């Protein structure tokens, strides 16, 4: 510690202890706070642009966190003394309200307030990373880093700084942006030991809803970045492996709860960013993906998918395009596919594109580029819908288009793993009533009816059924697609051998079919009687 820092510490610590004694008084008064702030102001500690003031913040932050660790541990967990943390939170709040502006100009006060907050967050973040690095080097059982202390600190600030207050209301959005930057820096990939506290802070009722309710939806891409980059990309390798440790399982459940909150309170957010979320969720996490895809705008009333003889193509909503805020074509640009793909969709040339397509979506080790496949499907589908809208109805053919030719080629040429990812990418677009849901539903049913390979039909069925056998909610487009598949004699679904390959599989299909029918409708005329009289008909 250099001489300047020692001098600041010698001056700051008595003031910190004085502040602690004020906070410990049962009947604190505004006068006590004002007197103390005058002392800080006179000493120059309230100036946000001063190096000594920055060192003062560093000293009191370190002192508060160090004091919080002095509580006795309980139940094999480190104890936390919240008193110094709450005192620090309160002091920072008061300092922001009374920070002096440059030349006492009222217009410069918001800038000084934000500077002070930024410096405080910067000091705390540096301390967190330093403590975490020390903990990594110390023997197991050392509690040099305690995420509960920082959770309390950030949580207190979120409550205090985002509550209605004349002194802070003009900069409320900037306060949210400052915390967004802090949480982005603290994401689990950077600080795994803070992951649980991080998720609680990002989903905090004084942060996530306020960010989503910010004027002009300016906070939407920021929250999307936090959740996708910070949470789901961190969880991806663990969820893909299938075997979840207890901590990862707990974090996964926390992620599900966040999605449920968003589905209930901000469904449009999930609607608009569905592509980004599905891109970051492994194909094995079916329920998690269903939560995202089940979202629909609050001003829409979903047509009942169980309505007999429902004419989906006549629904007024089915011609409307969905809003997609994700930059889904960027993955194609990364692998240099955009230009050739667009050229082929327009002119069916170069023909070499079809021959090269499988290798363009496959990695050197034989695994597939899920992000590229997802982007390709949505890019081609969006192009198809635009092309069909600009053509006369009589010439707007689905089956003979270049778009379906690409889809059919991938269906035939990809191996089982790649085809599964490709069919999942199509199923990801079966959402609420819109023209994307209608188009991709027709594409999936067309691929089922046109192929002569029953293995492909079985894989299409698997992609649909596995999304229906998990707990609700189920996406509307998924339901209407599967109902059409099993009810329309054109697809001859129940004659396929994979529906009768084993008694348990037969019962599974009948159970799913029953769950997709209107209550009391029965399966007569939908599911043919089993070949074996002793088999369970499910009736």
Image: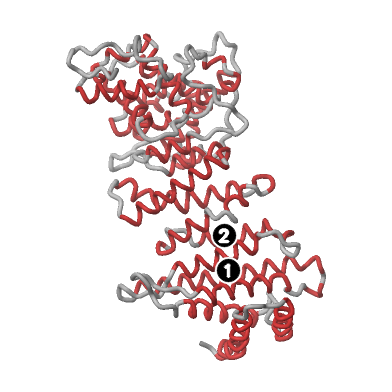
Q: In this view, does 462 lie above or below 193?
A: above
- Residue 383 in the image: above or below residue 193: above
Q: Is mark 1 on a helix, strand or loop?
A: helix
- Whether residue 404 is visible: no
Numbered circles on residues, count: 2
Q: Position of residue 73 (x, y in %)?
A: 38, 75
Q: Residue 1 at x, y = what percent?
A: 51, 87
Front-most of 345 and 398?
398
Question: Which part of the image, by quadrant, shows the C terminus?
Answer: top left
**Residues at badges 2 and 1 in contact (C-beta under 8 Å)?**
yes
In the shown orientation, is residue 44 left or right of residue 377? right
Which one is in front, 151 or 111? 151
Q: Mark 2 points at which residue?
A: 181
State the CA–CA distance, disc 2 to disc 1. 10 Å
Can residue 53 be seen? yes
Residue 57 - label: none
Q: In which quarter of the image is residue 386?
A: top right
- The crowding category of the residue bearing disc 2, from other C-alpha atoms within 10 Å (few below 14, some 14 to 19, many at least 20), is some
Which one is nearer the viewer's eye here, 271 or 519? Answer: 519
SS type, badge 2:
helix
Residue 210 % position (x, y):
62, 52
Q: Is residue 151 rendered to the left or right of residue 533?
A: right
- Looking at marks 2 and 1 on the same chain, the residue that comes earlier in the sequence is marked by 1
- The image shows residue 367 at horizontal and vertical percentages of 30, 40
Residue 433 lies in quadrant: top right
Residue identifier under label 1: 121
Query: Height in image: 54 above or below 434?
Result: below
Q: Camera-side residue: 313 or 49?
A: 313
Residue at coordinates 48% horizontally, 33% vertically from top-left?
Answer: 294
Q: From the viewer's perspective, is 454 left or right of 374?
A: left
């Amino acid at each position: 510690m250099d001489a300047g820092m020692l001098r600041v510490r010698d001056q700051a610590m008595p003031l910190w202890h004085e502040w602690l004694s004020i906070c410990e008084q049962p009947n604190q008064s505004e006068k006590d706070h004002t007197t103390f702030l005058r002392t800080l102001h006179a000493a120059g500690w309230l100036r946000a642009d001063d190096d000594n003031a920055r060192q003062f913040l560093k000293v009191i932050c370190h002192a508060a966190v160090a004091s919080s660790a002095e509580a006795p541990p309980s139940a094999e967990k480190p104890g936390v003394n919240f008193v110094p943390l709450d005192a620090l939170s309160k002091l920072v709040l008061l300092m922001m309200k009374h920070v002096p502006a440059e030349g006492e100009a009222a217009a410069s006060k918001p800038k000084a307030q934000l500077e002070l907050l930024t410096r405080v967050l910067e000091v705390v973040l540096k301390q967190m990373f330093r403590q975490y690095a020390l903990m990594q080097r110390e023997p197991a059982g050392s509690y040099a880093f305690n995420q509960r202390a920082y959770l309390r600190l950030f949580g207190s600030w979120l409550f205090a700084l985002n509550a209605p207050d004349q002194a802070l209301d003009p900069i409320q959005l900037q306060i949210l942006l400052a915390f967004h930057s802090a949480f982005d820096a603290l994401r689990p990939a950077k600080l795994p030991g803070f992951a649980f506290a991080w998720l609680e802070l990002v989903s905090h009722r004084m942060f996530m809803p306020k960010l989503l309710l910010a004027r002009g939806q300016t906070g939407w891409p920021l929250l999307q970045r936090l959740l996708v980059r910070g949470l789901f990309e961190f969880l991806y390798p663990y969820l893909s492996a299938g075997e979840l440790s207890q901590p990862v399982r707990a974090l996964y459940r926390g992620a599900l709860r966040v999605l449920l909150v968003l589905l209930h309170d901000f469904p449009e957010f999930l609607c608009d960013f569905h592509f980004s979320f599905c891109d970051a969720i492994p194909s094995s996490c079916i329920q998690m993906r269903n939560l995202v895809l089940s979202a629909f705008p609050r001003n829409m009333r979903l047509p009942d998918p169980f309505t007999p003889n429902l004419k989906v193509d006549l629904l007024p909503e089915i011609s409307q395009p969905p809003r997609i805020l994700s930059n889904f074509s960027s993955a194609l640009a990364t692998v240099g596919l955009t230009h050739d793909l667009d050229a082929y969709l327009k002119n069916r040339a170069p023909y070499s594109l079809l021959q090269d397509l499988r290798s363009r979506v496959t990695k050197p080790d034989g695994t597939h580029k899920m992000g590229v496949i997802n982007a390709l499907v949505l890019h081609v589908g969006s192009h198809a819908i635009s092309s069909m809208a600009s053509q006369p109805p009589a010439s707007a053919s689905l089956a003979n288009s270049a778009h379906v030719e690409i889809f059919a080629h991938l269906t035939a040429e990809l191996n089982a793993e790649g085809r599964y990812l490709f069919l999942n990418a199509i199923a990801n677009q079966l959402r609420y009533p819109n023209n994307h849901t209608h188009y991709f539903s027709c594409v999936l049913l067309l691929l089922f009816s046109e192929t002569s390979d029953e293995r492909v039909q079985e894989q299409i069925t698997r992609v649909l059924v596995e999304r229906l056998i998990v707990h609700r909610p189920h996406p509307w487009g998924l339901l209407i697609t599967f109902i059409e598949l099993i009810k329309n004699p054109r697809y001859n679904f129940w004659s396929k051998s994979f529906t009768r390959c084993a008694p348990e599989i037969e019962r599974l299909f009948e159970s799913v079919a029953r769950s997709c029918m209107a209550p009391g409708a029965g399966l007569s005329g939908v599911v043919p009687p089993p070949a074996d009289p002793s088999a369970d008909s499910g009736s």
